Image (cartoon, helix red, strand yellow):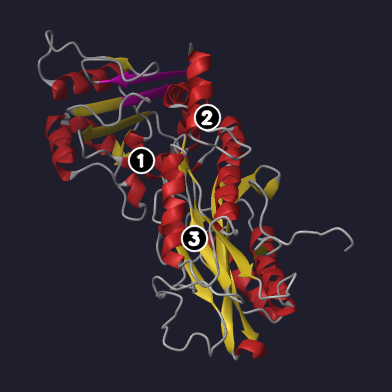
C-alpha cells in the first residue's frame, strides 16, 4: 500500500525532474533519522569542542528558540506549552544524556525526565536534574552577535535564574559557540541530500527560464516569479523567500524604468535581447537553497548570447574562484572578504561579495563574508571574529560590474550558488552556472 501511495504521489505532482520529492511520511522518516544521527554523533563532538557539558534550551509554544526548533521531531511542528531540553555530556564516560523536562518524550532521541504527579513544578524538576549532574557549565542560548543563538526570551531567562540556586549562577554562560556550530555543521548524509535539493532548484530555474514559461513580448517578470512560486507549491515543497526575476538591457530600452541593485521595476515585459536574473531558493527536509542564475533572450537569428555577456559570466566565475580559494579553516569572514576583493580588483575586476551561511536557515549561522552594503567587512562577531569551520555550507553570493559599450551602460553579473567547505577544501554542492541559459533553447536542425 505504501508503494502504491508513493507512486500516486509522484504522478499527481507531475514531477518532471531527475530528483524525486518524497511524500510527507517518507520525509518524516528521513528527518527523524538525521536528527538521531546529529544528537548521537555530532552533538557530543560539538559539546567537547566548545567545552560545554550541559546545554539547556527553553521555549514556549509558538515562540520557539530557532535552535530548539531544529531539534523537534518531524511530527512536532511547534514546541508544546513550555518545552525544556537538557543535554548533558560526560566526556570521561563517553556518554550524552538527552532529556526533556516535559510530560512526554520529544521524538525518539529525547526522553521525558519529568513526572508532574511527583513534582508539579517544572522549574524545580529542572533544578533537580542540574543538581544531580553538577555540571561545570550551564549554557543558555543568549548572544549579542548571532541572532540564531539568541533564542532564550527574557521571561524564561528570569524564571530560570530565579529558580536556579545561587551557587550555580557563576556556571551560567552563553551557548553561542555551541548553538552556531549545531546550526552550521552538516553531516555526510545531509550533504548527500543537499545535492538533491540544489539539483531540484537548478531544474526549476532552468524550466522557468525557458520557452515553456517565457514568451518574449508577452510574459512579465512578475509572472515568472509567481510561476516559480506555484511550481514549488505544486511539487509539495516550500520556499523561504519570494522569488525575484529582473532584467538588464540597453540604456535606451530601459528608458522609463528605474533600476538599481536594491530596487527593480515590477512587472516588466521580457523582450528579446534581455539579460534575465533570478534569485530563488527552496526548503526541503529542513534544509534551504539559495541560487541566482542568468539567462539571455535570443533576438531573431541569434543562436547564442553576445560575446560581451558570455565574457561577463566568465568574469563572474573568476570572482567566485578568488573567493572560494581564500576559504581556509580558521579565517574570519572579514579576512576572506578583504583578501578576495583585493585579488579580484588587482586583475581589473569590479567585484562585490556578500556570501552568507546556508543550511537549516536560508540566512543561517556561521561566518559572514561581506554584505552588499558593507564591503569593508561586517563589524560584528559573525564576520569579524567567527572563523570558517569545515563541514559547513555557504551561499556563494556575489557580483561583478562590467561595462558594455554596446548597451551604453554598466551592468552587474549577479551569481549565487550553494558551496560546501569540508576537510578537503571547497566544492560546489551541485555545480555552478558557467553558461548562460538561452530562451528559447537553440535546437539543431538537419543539414546544419
| Residue that sits furthest to the front in the current view | 446
| Viewer-side residue, 417 vs 411 | 411
Residue at the image point whose x is 61% and y is 87% from the top? 407
Alpha carbon separation for disc pair 3 and 1 = 33 Å
Q: Secondary structure at mark 1?
A: loop
Q: Mark number for residue 11?
A: 2
Q: For residue 369: magenta?
A: no
Where does residue 192 sit, x and y in percent of width and height?
62, 34
**Visible residue check, residue 426:** yes
Where does residue 410 sit, x and y in percent of width and height?
58, 85
Q: Secondary structure at mark 2?
A: helix
* Front label number (3 vs 1): 3
Alpha carbon separation for disc pair 3 and 2 = 28 Å
Quadrant including the C terminus: bottom right
Where does residue 274 sit, x and y in percent of width and height?
58, 75
Q: Residues within 10 Å of mark 2 (few under 14, many from 20)?
A: few
- Most frequent secondary structure within the magenta stretch: strand
Q: Mark number for residue 279?
A: 3
Look at the image and give the residue range highlighted in magenta.
86-100
State which tag comes first along the sequence, 2 or 1: 2
**Visible residue check, residue 22:** no
Residue contact at pointers 3 and 2, CB within 8 angstroms: no
Q: Mark number for residue 175?
A: 1
Q: Is residue 89 left or right of residue 138?
A: right
Amino acid at each position: 500500500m505504501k508503494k502504491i501511495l508513493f507512486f500516486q504521489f509522484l504522478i499527481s505532482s507531475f514531477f518532471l525532474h531527475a530528483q524525486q520529492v518524497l511524500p510527507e511520511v517518507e520525509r518524516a522518516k528521513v528527518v527523524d533519522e538525521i536528527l538521531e544521527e546529529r544528537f548521537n554523533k555530532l552533538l557530543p563532538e560539538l559539546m567537547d569542542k566548545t567545552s560545554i557539558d550541559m546545554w539547556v534550551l527553553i521555549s514556549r509554544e509558538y515562540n520557539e528558540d530557532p535552535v530548539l526548533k531544529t531539534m523537534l521531531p518531524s511530527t512536532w511542528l511547534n514546541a508544546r506549552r513550555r518545552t525544556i531540553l537538557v543535554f548533558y555530556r560526560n566526556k570521561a564516560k563517553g556518554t550524552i544524556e538527552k532529556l526533556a523536562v516535559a510530560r512526554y518524550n520529544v521524538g525518539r532521541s529525547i526522553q521525558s525526565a519529568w513526572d508532574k504527579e511527583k513534582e508539579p513544578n517544572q522549574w524545580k524538576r529542572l533544578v533537580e536534574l542540574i543538581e544531580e549532574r553538577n555540571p561545570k557549565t550551564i549554557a543558555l542560548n543568549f548572544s549579542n552577535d548571532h541572532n540564531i543563538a539568541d533564542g532564550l526570551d527574557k521571561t524564561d531567562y528570569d524564571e530560570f535564574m530565579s529558580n536556579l540556586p545561587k551557587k550555580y549562577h557563576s556556571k551560567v554562560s552563553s551557548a553561542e559557540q555551541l548553538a552556531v556550530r549545531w546550526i552550521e555543521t552538516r553531516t555526510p548524509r545531509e550533504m548527500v541530500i543537499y545535492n538533491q535539493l540544489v539539483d531540484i532548484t537548478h531544474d526549476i530555474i532552468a524550466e522557468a527560464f525557458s520557452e515553456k514559461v517565457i514568451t518574449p513580448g508577452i510574459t512579465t517578470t512578475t509572472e515568472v516569479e509567481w510561476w516559480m512560486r506555484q511550481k514549488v507549491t505544486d511539487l509539495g515543497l516550500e520556499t523561504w523567500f519570494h522569488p525575484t526575476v529582473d532584467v538588464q538591457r540597453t540604456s535606451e530600452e530601459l528608458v522609463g524604468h528605474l533600476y538599481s541593485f536594491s530596487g527593480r521595476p515590477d512587472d516588466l515585459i521580457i523582450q528579446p535581447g534581455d539579460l534575465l536574473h533570478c534569485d530563488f531558493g527552496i526548503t526541503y527536509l529542513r534544509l534551504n537553497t539559495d541560487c541566482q542564475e542568468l539567462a539571455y533572450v535570443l533576438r531573431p537569428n541569434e543562436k547564442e548570447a553576445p560575446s560581451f555577456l558570455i565574457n561577463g559570466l566568465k568574469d563572474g566565475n573568476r570572482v567566485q574562484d578568488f573567493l572560494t580559494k581564500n576559504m581556509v579553516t580558521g579565517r574570519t569572514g572579514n579576512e576572506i572578504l578583504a583578501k578576495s576583493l583585493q585579488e579580484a580588483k588587482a586583475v581589473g575586476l569590479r567585484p562585490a561579495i556578500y556570501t552568507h551561511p546556508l543550511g537549516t536557515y536560508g540566512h543561517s549561522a556561521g561566518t559572514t563574508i561581506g554584505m552588499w552594503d558593507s564591503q569593508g567587512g561586517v563589524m560584528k562577531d559573525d564576520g569579524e571574529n567567527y572563523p570558517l569551520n569545515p563541514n559547513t555550507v555557504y551561499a556563494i553570493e556575489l557580483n561583478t560590474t562590467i561595462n558594455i559599450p554596446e548597451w551604453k551602460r554598466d551592468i552587474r553579473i549577479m551569481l549565487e550558488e550553494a558551496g560546501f567547505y569540508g576537510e578537503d577544501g571547497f566544492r560546489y554542492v551541485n555545480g555552478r552556472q558557467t553558461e548562460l541559459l538561452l530562451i528559447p533553447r537553440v535546437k539543431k536542425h538537419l543539414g546544419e
